[in-house]
Image (tube, grey):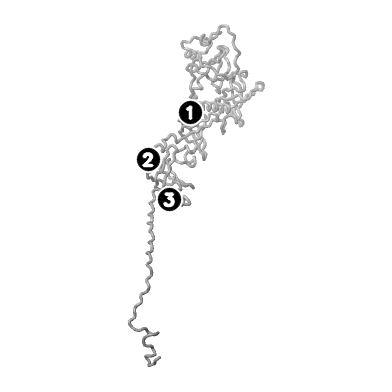
């Protein structure tokens, strides 16, 4: 086997020395002299390797079957990503092989690998494309001295109005079509962006746990809630009921697209990728102390927040409402809640029941109404017992009766005698 250390260039030699420390080269490679080399890896191959050593700018990867690779760390450092650790398994894309030192040029999966000629290119590889010019159809690029083309629709996941702005940039791009005989090389940066986002999302979904607090950006707002980007293109939904402890009718009343917001993860469906978020859970629930503030029997004051057929809701403080059932509105029978109270009207109630866990409170207006004075029942007097009727008293006459028999007749007064 050729002397590996003697064949490395100056930069790689320094990294190699720093990474190895006191480790022997023969122990690192674990290769027997004269052993038959395995079949070379094809450019564009993706596999999982093991980190053998990490230097300031380069990590050395065991690719299996006595094959090793060198991975530059500059791209990871620029992207702010974590560097691999010794012993860690990493997925890499394989590029060309240096015949002098036997090391493959490797890059993290979905990152560009270096190529030098058509023989090292394969469809599906990710390469660095240097943009040389722009036209109406797309971008003219150069890949390892080879000319390629990137259609405008494949430049990005979003529309770029002025492609001239891309000239001079180096774009990690996927080889989508390769015809060496025709010198035809078609590239797609959009595919790389989508793939990197999908991988980042999958990684985030694996590590995300309920209770994690994150900073996000509102991407869109609907009546039922807001979709928040929590990183790497991963979006979660903050339902309208999770925006505030206050009742929110429309999410647009609280959030706008582009607004930064801090959220907490409530639930994750790893199969569908759906993430439920909450903004209100970052603030203590006002119901936590509701049982102490609004004990049963207490008299409370609030304002009617909304009316339903079955009763009226009374807002006691931000986030705390109680229900006055229609049967508890008045002492008299009523047909409609609106006949007794109006929205916004201040009312005084008595607390009938409190359930902080279910965030429910029963109130009564009727309980504070003055008790109507009951009229005393007046028993009808019994009629006095009737005494037996007495016969009429007939006065005795002292003189003779007038007319009839007896006494002087009327004719006698005139000298007549009968």
- The residue lying furthest to the left in this view is 398
State whether residue 402 is above or below residue 74.
Answer: below
- The residue lying furthest to the right in this view is 181
Eye-nearest disc, 3 or 2: 3
Q: Are marks 3 and 1 in contact (CB under 8 Å)?
A: no
If you read the primary sequence from the N terminus, does the residue marked by circle 1 or circle 2 appear first? 1
From the viewer's side, name the closer residue of 153 and 250.
250
- Cα distance, mark 1 to mark 2? 34 Å
Q: In the structure shown, which secondary structural element does the residue marked by tag 3 occupy?
A: loop
Q: Are marks 3 and 2 in contact (CB under 8 Å)?
A: no
Question: What is the number of the mark on residue 209?
Answer: 1
If you read the primary sequence from the N terminus, does the residue marked by circle 3 or circle 2 appear first? 2
- Cα distance, mark 3 to mark 1? 50 Å
Q: Is residue 270 visible?
A: yes
Residue 198 in picture, x, y percent from top left: 55, 27
From the viewer's side, name the closer residue of 321 and 198.
321
Question: Quarter-wise, where is residue 156 in the image?
Answer: top right
Identify residue for label 2.
Answer: 293
State whether residue 340 is above or below residue 28.
Answer: below
Residue 407 in picture, x, y percent from top left: 36, 86
Question: What is the number of the mark on residue 370?
Answer: none
In the rendered picture of this protein, how many numbered marks are placed on residues?
3
Identify residue for label 3.
Answer: 330
Residue 373 in picture, x, y percent from top left: 37, 54
Residue 336 in picture, x, y percent from top left: 48, 51
State whether residue 163 is above or below residue 371.
Answer: above
Q: In the structure shown, which secondary structural element does the residue marked by tag 2 occupy?
A: helix
Q: Quadrant of the N terminus?
A: top right
- Cα distance, mark 3 to mark 2? 25 Å
């Amino acid at each position: 086997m050729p002397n590996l250390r003697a064949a490395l260039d100056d930069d790689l030699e320094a990294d190699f020395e720093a990474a190895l420390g006191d480790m022997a080269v023969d122990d690192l490679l674990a290769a027997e002299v004269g052993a038959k080399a395995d079949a070379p890896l094809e450019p564009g191959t993706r596999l999982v390797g093991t980190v053998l050593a990490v230097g300031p700018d380069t990590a050395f990867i065991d690719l299996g079957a006595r094959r090793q690779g060198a991975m530059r760390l500059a791209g990871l450092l620029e992207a702010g990503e974590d560097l691999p650790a010794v012993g860690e398994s990493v997925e890499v894309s394989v590029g060309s092989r240096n015949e002098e030192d036997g090391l493959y040029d490797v890059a993290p999966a979905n990152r560009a690998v270096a190529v030098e000629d058509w023989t090292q290119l394969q469809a599906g590889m990710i390469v660095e494309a240097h943009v040389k010019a722009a036209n109406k159809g797309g971008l003219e690029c150069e890949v390892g001295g080879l000319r390629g083309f990137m259609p405008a629709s494949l430049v990005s996941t979003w529309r770029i109005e002025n492609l001239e702005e891309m000239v001079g940039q180096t774009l990690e791009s996927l080889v989508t079509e390769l015809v060496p005989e025709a010198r035809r090389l078609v590239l797609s940066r959009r595919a790389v962006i989508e793939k990197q986002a999908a991988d980042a999302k999958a990684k985030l979904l694996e590590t995300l746990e309920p209770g994690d607090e994150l900073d996000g950006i509102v991407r869109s707002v609907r009546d039922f809630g807001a979709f928040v980007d929590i990183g790497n293109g991963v979006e979660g939904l903050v339902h309208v009921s999770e925006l505030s402890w206050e009742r929110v009718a429309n999410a647009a009343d609280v959030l706008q697209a582009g607004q930064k917001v801090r959220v907490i993860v409530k639930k994750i469906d790893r199969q569908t990728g759906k993430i439920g978020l909450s903004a209100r859970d970052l603030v203590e629930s006002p119901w936590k102390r509701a049982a102490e503030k609004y004990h049963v029997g207490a008299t409370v004051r609030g304002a009617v927040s909304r009316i339903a057929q079955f009763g009226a809701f009374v807002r006691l403080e931000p986030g705390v409402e109680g229900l006055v059932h229609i049967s508890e509105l008045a002492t008299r029978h009523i047909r409609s809640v609106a006949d007794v109270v109006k929205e916004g009207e201040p009312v005084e109630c008595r607390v009938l029941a409190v359930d902080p866990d279910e965030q429910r409170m029963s109130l009564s207006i009727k309980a504070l109404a003055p008790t109507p004075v009951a009229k005393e029942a007046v028993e009808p007097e019994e009629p006095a017992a009737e005494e037996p009727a007495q016969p009429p008293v007939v006065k005795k006459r002292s003189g003779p009766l007038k007319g009839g028999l007896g006494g002087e007749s009327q004719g006698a007064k005139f000298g007549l005698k009968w």
